[in-house]
Image (cartoon, helix red, strand yellow):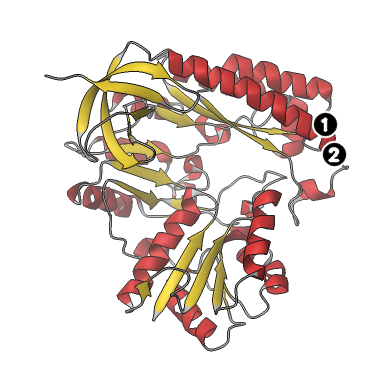
Amino acid sequence: MKFYIETYGCTLNQHDSALMKELLIKKGLVESSEDDADVIIINTCGVKDATEKRIIERLKGIKKPVVVGGCIAAADGQLARRFAPHATLIGTYSTKYICSAVEDALRGGCGEFFNACDKGGLEYTFTPPIAGIAVSEGCTSACTYCFAKLARPKLRSMRLGEVIRRIKAANEAGVKELRLTSQDMGAYGLERGASLKGLLSQIADIGDLGLKIRIGMINPKHLKEQMEIIDIIMENECFYKFFHVPLQSGSDRILKLMGRENTVDEYFGIIKEIRKDRLANIMNDIIVGFPGENEEDFELSVEAVKRVQADTTNVSKFSVRPGTEAARMQLWDKNAAKKRSIIMSKLCDSISLQRNSLWVGRTCGVTLLEKVKSTVGRNEYYKQVAADGRIGETVMCRIVSAGVAYLKGEIIKD
C-alpha cells in the first residue's frame, strides 16, 4: 500500500508530517509519488487566506482516498468537507492515529480522528544534515487574528529530559542543523513548571555537540520575562545567533487590538539587548492593513521597522480568518493594505540587503547543508551562504557579495 503526503505551512506542520511518515512506514506502507499512491494525505495550513484558497483548489482535484490534517481539519473541518466530501479528518493533536485514519480513507472515508495523543512518545528518525524537534505546540497567547490558536489551542510541551535525549540522538545521527520548533518557543514548558530559559541552559550544558541549534519564534511577551535567554544563545556555540521575535505592528493601539501582550518600547528594549552584538541575526514579522489601522499607525510601523533593522522581515497583508476575533472587527481597506504591503516589503528588502552587506569582506565558517541552485549552508549567525563544497562539511569562506536573502562565499584554501 502506497501513500503520498503534501504539507503546507509552518515547521510544526512539517514535523507532524515527518511523524506521520514514520508511523506509516513502520506500519508497512510505502511513500510514493502522487500518481502511484493509493491514499493522499494533505496536511493543511489556514493561517493566510491565500494559502487556504490554494488548498481548496487542491482538494477539489483529488479523486483518490484522502486524509486531511493540519489547521483547517482541526479548526474548520466543514470547509474541508465542502470540497472533499469523503475525506477522513485528523486533528493536529492526533498524529498517533494516522494509520487508522488512512485505513478509514481506504474504506471510503468520512471518519474523524480528533483524540489527543502525547507526541512526545512518538519516535522520530533523524536524517542528516537538517532535522527538527517540535518541543511544544499550542501557546498561552490570545492574538485576535490567529487561526493557529483555533487549531492548536492548548499548550502541550515535551518533557525537558525527552528534548535533551532527542538532541543527543540527533547529534549521534550526524545532524548538522537542528531546528527546535513550536507555535511559540517562549511558552515552552509553562504548563508543566518548566521554561525555555531552563531548557536552553540544559542544552548548553550537554557539551561536545557537533551540530548547531536554531531556536524558533519567541513572542516578545515571553522574551521580556526571560531576558537571560539572549545571553544563553549568544554565549554558547551550540546555538545559532538568531532570534525570531515578531513585532507585528509599530503602533501600540494596533498591538492592543491584535491582543499582543507587549508594547513597542518593550520590543525595542529586547532588540537593544540582542544587538549588543551588531551582527546578531533578527527576524521580524509585520502585519499591514489590520482592522482599524490608519495611515498614522502604518507610518509608526514603517518607523519601527527602520529602527529595528531586522535581517529578515515577513510582511503579511491582513486577511480575515474565520472564527477569529479579528474577523468580527470593522472592515478593513483591502486596497490600502495592498499598497502598504508593497511599501513595507520594499523597505524590508532594502534593510535586509544593508544587513547582509555588513558581511562582505568578512571570513566565517560555513556548514554546507543543502543544494538549492548551488550548495548553500549557514554561518554561526544563521546567514545563508552559497559556496562550493560537499554537503555536510564545514568550510572557511570569505564573503564576496550579498543579496537580499543570501551571501556569496569563496572558500579559503589552506
* 328 displayed left or right of 53: right
Q: Nearer the viewer, residue 338 or 48?
A: 338
Circle 1 sits on which residue? 336
- Specify the label residue 185 is tagged with: none
Q: Quadrant of residue 66?
A: bottom right
Q: CB of mark 2 within 8 Å of CB of mark 1?
A: yes
Q: Amino acid at mark 1?
A: Ala
Up-down relation of residue 265 to residue 368 (above or below): above
Up-down relation of residue 117 to residue 238 (above or below): below
* 117 displayed left or right of 163: right
Mark 1 lies on a secondary structure that is helix
Mark 2 lies on a secondary structure that is loop
Kindly report which numbered mark, 2 or 1, lies closer to the viewer in this rendering.
1
Looking at the picture, how far across and down is residue 88, in whole percent?
58, 77
Circle 2 sits on which residue? 332
Q: Amino acid at mark 2?
A: Trp
Q: Residue furthest bottom?
A: 107
Looking at the picture, how far across and down is residue 123, in whole percent?
31, 64
